[in-house]
Amino acid sequence: MSTKTIILLCFILYTALLFFVMWLSSRRSSGNDAFFRGNRKSPWPVVAYGMLGASLSGVTFMSVPGGVYHGAFTYMPLVFGYVIGYFVIAFLLLPLYYRLNLTSIYSYLEQRFGGTSERTGAIFFILSRLLGSALRMYLVVFVLYELVFCSWGIPFWVPAVVFIALILLYTFRGGIKTVVWTDTLQTTFLLLAAIATVIVILKNLDISIPELLVASSDEGYTRIFETDFNHPKYYWKQIISGAFITIAMTGLDQDMMQKNLTCKSLRDAQKNVITSSFLFIVVNIIFLTLGAALIYYGMHTPGFEFPVNADGVVVGDKIYPLIAQSMGGFVLICFILGMIAAGYSSADGTLTALTATFCFDFLHFDRRDDLDEQRKVRIRKMTHVGFALLYLLVIIAFRPFHNDSLINILFDIAGYTYGPLLGLYAFGLFTKRGVRDRLVPIVAILSPVLCYLLKIYSAQLFNGYQLGFELLILNGVLTFAGLMLISKKVKV
């Protein structure tokens, strides 16, 4: 059986399995409450396990292992920071969301500041997710295109359209209720692919895990802490940035929070978040170990050459797919199933969350008495299709710009787009002042622009210091300061 046949067969079988899960999860309910909130009946262990797959995506699947080549294990301090962020979400943000009985978390901004602030927060989320999730899925489509469709002369947009159409079909009816269950399937295949690949590489090279880690350590590939203060991955910057990245990209993200809000109670949602935080450490150790195994395989396999770009620099994102293709057989099957799972997990929850945000923060489904349930369902479906088309356009448009590790690009995007959300929520939670609502968009736009300029000239301005992931924190602080300037005392 040829490689291309194996890949297509894996794709068809996995897709069929997803549609079976969709049928099981949505056969007894198809209304808006099931679509947006899962009827608030999701078991918390299922949500916790599924959130791993939603957090990992194709970027983690390829960029984290591939990033070991240039960055060793310096990704781990960022993960340690994630745990801190998850605790903040569990004991600060979730109680707020449950107390206000929110469907869209940006409704809080309207209650606290006004409608313009709500729409500003929603727009920044939409921008963040359209770019971030589309690029995650782009990576999956790109790899499958390179492995199969390119040699057949099929344009890049064709597999992109197929992927989006299938995701649209299986989320169209069940929404978040379906996504909660399909996420568990995707998490399983992502982890099995990584673990199985490590096992096969160890067996082929006749080496154990301890021996692999010792050999990788000797080559400098297991270094966890970057101690150079001026380096973008200085470990304290990583830890602090990791905490704020999680608060912003999970706690202030409708996609991730919508799944938590399907739990039966606040207590269940908190157990879900805390469990996910510790599981995330384990999962990232697995993926970093996979990176060490891939590099060891490449260095000790005669004739193998690491993929490089036009400048001769090794491209981390391409290491795993190239090795999987060269090994073939079981490793290739594992890789393809993991990639397909990552592709679906990057988009299904996002489309549902974008639809929820538009319907509740712009159309105000929760207080529109002039719209009956049937009309709301029609509008929701039209919105769902519209965002799917936008998603597709971003994937296709990014193709000429893929020259760097996507995980770095994604965190750069997050630094600019989630920063205003971080500042808005911090101001709302930690002050009692109101703001001039109509001026909030100006602050939210100026802050990322200023951060962009500071990032470009940080080395010149700060004696060699380079802004890294902490750009998100700086953006939040600037937004907070801007809101203070346009704030006013609120009469109690």
Image (spheres, grey):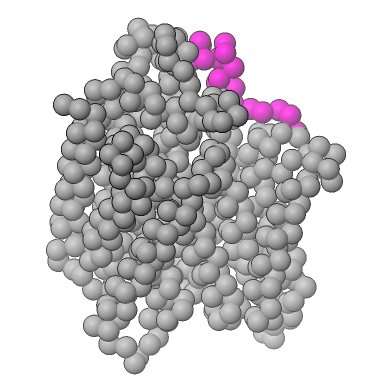
Q: Does residue 253 belong to the magenta stretch?
A: no
Q: Residue at x 18, y 38 (%)?
A: 9
- Above or below — where is 164 with respect to 435? above
**Going by the picture, which residue comes out furthest to the bottom?**
370
Q: Position of residue 150 (x, y in %)?
A: 33, 39
Give the overall secondary structure of the magenta segment: loop
- Quarter holding the N terminus is top left
Residue 285 appearing in the image: no
Task: Write down the region rendered in magenta.
Answer: 213-229
- Quarter holding the C terminus is bottom right
Asked which quadrant contains residue 480, the reply is bottom right
Asked which quadrant contains residue 62, the reply is top left
Q: With 55 as the anchor, is 243 left or right in this view?
A: right
- Above or below — where is 194 with respect to 128? above
- Above or below — where is 160 with respect to 235? below
Q: With 58 as the anchor, is 248 left or right in this view?
A: right
Q: Nearer the viewer, residue 234 or 157?
A: 157
Q: Position of residue 261 (x, y in %)?
A: 38, 62
Q: With 42 as the anchor, is 359 left or right in this view?
A: right
Q: Does residue 218 belong to the magenta stretch?
A: yes
Q: Residue at x 52, y 15 (%)?
A: 216
